[in-house]
C-alpha cells in the first residue's frame, strides 16, 4: 500500500450548546454529567407556572372576545334587517358591521398571542436536540437562567460517529480528488501508546482551500467510534492509503544504505559473496520498503 502517515485530531461530529429560550428558575435536571443522552430526551425543566398562567389568561381573553363577537354578529344581523325595511339608519348598520369586524380581528390576535404563550410554555421543558455525551453542568437546579444567556447550561458532543481531522501535502490533491470520486479513501486512526486496533473510516471532506503557509490541505475522515475510544480534542496518528502497488518488490528497510551515489543494498550472490546494487526506493510500509528500480 502507498500510504500517507501524518498526525491529526479528533473532532465532534456535532456540538450543541444548550441554552434556555425563556427566563425562569431551573426546577430540575434529568441527567448526570458525562451521561449519554438521546435526541428528544428531557434535560432541564424551567418553572412553568408563570407561562401557564399567561396561557390561561390569554385563553380567557379569547373566550371573552368570542362572546363579544357573537353579540356583535347578532347586532349586525338585526340592524341589517332593520335597515332593509327602513327602521334603522345606515350609520347604525355601519357601526354594527365595524364592531363585528373589530371583534373578529381581536379573536385572531388572541389566537396568535396564545400560540406565542404556548411556545414559551413549551420552552420551559428543555430537550436534547442530538444524541451525544454531556459535559459539565453549568446551571444547577434552583438557579435563575436568562433567555439566550452567554454561558450555556451544558454542552453536548455527538461522538458516534466522530471526525478525525488531518492535513496532507497539496501535491497529493489530484489523486485524492480522483479517489474520492471513485469510491473513497480509507483512513486508519491510532491512539498513541494504546495497544488496540486502529479505528477505520473513509475520507468524507476535502477542504476547498490549500493553506498557503504550510502547503497542505485539510481532510476529514468519519469514524464510527461505536465503542467511544476516540474523544473530541484527542491527538491521533493517521494513515491514509492512496493506492496499492501490485507485485511490488519489497525488502526490509534496514537493508537500505545511503552513499554518495544514492541508495544501495548489498545483494548476496549464489557463490555467497555480496555485491553493491544501486536502488531507487519507493514507498515504505511498516518495516518494509518498496524498490522501484
Image (cartoon, rainbow, N blue to C red):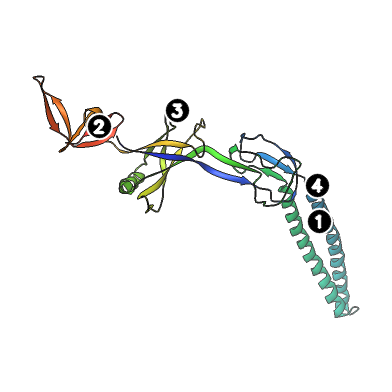
> Within 10 angstroms of label 1, few (less than 14), some, or many (20 or more) residues?
some
Q: Are marks 2 and 4 in contact (CB under 8 Å)?
A: no
Q: Quarter of the image containing the N terminus?
A: top left
Tell me what residue is drawn at x 88 percent, y 78 percent. 85
Q: Secondary structure at mark 4?
A: helix
Q: Position of residue 26 (x, y in %)?
A: 74, 43
CA gap between label 2 and label 1 equals 78 Å
Mark nearer the N terminus (3 vs 2)? 3
Disc 2: which residue:
289
Q: Position of residue 162 (x, y in %)?
A: 49, 39
Q: Secondary structure at mark 3?
A: loop
Q: Is residue 5 left or right of residue 247?
A: right
CA gap between label 1 and label 3 equals 62 Å
Q: Quarter of the image containing the C terminus?
A: top left
CA gap between label 1 and label 4 equals 14 Å
Q: Position of residue 255 (x, y in %)?
A: 21, 28
Mark nearer the N terminus (2 vs 1)? 1
Disc 3: which residue:
194
Q: Nearer the viewer, residue 135 or 249?
A: 135
Tell me what residue is drawn at x 69 percent, y 36 percent. 30
Mark nearer the N terminus (4 vs 3)? 4
CA gap between label 2 and label 4 equals 72 Å
The relative height of residue 257 versus residue 95 in the rendered view (above or below) is above
Residue 248, by quadrant, is top left
Q: Is residue 118 left or right of residue 70?
A: left
Q: Nearer the viewer, residue 175 or 231?
A: 231
Q: Position of residue 115 (x, y in %)?
A: 73, 55
Q: Is residue 10 left or right of residue 238?
A: right
> Within 10 angstroms of label 3, few (less than 14), some, or many (20 or more) residues?
few
Q: Nearer the viewer, mark 1 or mark 3?
A: 3
Disc 1: which residue:
58
Tell me what residue is drawn at x 61 percent, y 40 percent. 39
Amino acid at each position: 500500500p502507498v500510504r500517507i502517515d501524518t498526525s491529526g485530531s479528533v473532532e465532534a461530529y456535532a456540538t450543541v450548546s444548550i441554552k434556555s429560550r425563556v427566563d425562569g428558575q431551573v426546577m430540575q435536571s434529568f441527567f448526570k454529567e458525562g451521561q449519554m443522552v438521546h435526541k428528544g430526551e428531557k434535560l432541564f425543566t424551567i418553572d412553568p407556572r408563570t407561562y401557564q398562567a399567561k396561557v390561561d389568561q390569554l385563553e380567557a381573553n379569547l373566550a371573552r372576545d368570542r362572546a363579544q363577537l357573537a353579540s356583535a354578529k347578532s347586532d349586525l344581523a338585526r340592524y341589517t334587517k332593520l335597515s332593509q325595511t327602513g327602521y334603522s339608519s345606515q350609520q347604525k348598520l355601519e357601526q354594527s358591521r365595524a364592531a363585528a369586524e373589530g371583534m373578529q380581528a381581536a379573536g385572531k390576535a388572541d389566537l396568535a398571542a396564545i400560540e406565542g404563550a404556548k411556545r414559551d410554555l413549551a420552552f420551559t421543558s428543555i430537550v436534547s436536540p442530538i444524541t451525544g455525551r454531556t459535559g459539565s453542568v453549568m446551571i444547577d437546579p434552583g438557579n435563575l437562567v436568562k433567555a439566550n444567556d452567554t454561558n450555556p447550561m451544558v454542552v453536548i458532543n455527538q461522538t458516534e460517529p466522530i471526525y478525525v481531522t488531518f492535513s496532507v501535502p497539496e501535491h497529493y490533491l489530484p489523486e485524492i480528488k480522483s479517489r474520492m470520486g471513485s469510491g473513497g479513501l480509507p483512513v486508519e486512526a491510532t491512539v498513541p501508546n494504546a495497544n488496540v486496533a486502529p479505528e477505520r473510516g473513509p475520507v468524507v471532506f476535502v477542504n476547498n482551500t490549500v493553506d498557503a503557509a504550510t502547503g497542505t490541505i485539510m481532510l476529514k475522515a468519519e469514524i464510527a467510534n461505536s465503542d467511544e475510544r476516540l474523544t473530541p480534542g484527542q491527538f491521533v496518528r493517521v494513515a491514509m492509503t492512496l493506492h496499492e502497488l501490485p507485485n511490488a518488490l519489497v525488502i526490509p528497510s534496514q537493508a537500505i544504505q545511503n552513499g554518495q551515489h544514492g541508495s544501495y543494498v548489498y545483494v548476496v550472490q549464489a557463490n555467497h559473496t555480496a555485491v553493491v546494487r544501486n536502488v531507487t526506493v519507493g514507498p515504505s510500509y511498516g518495516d518494509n520498503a518498496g524498490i522501484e528500480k
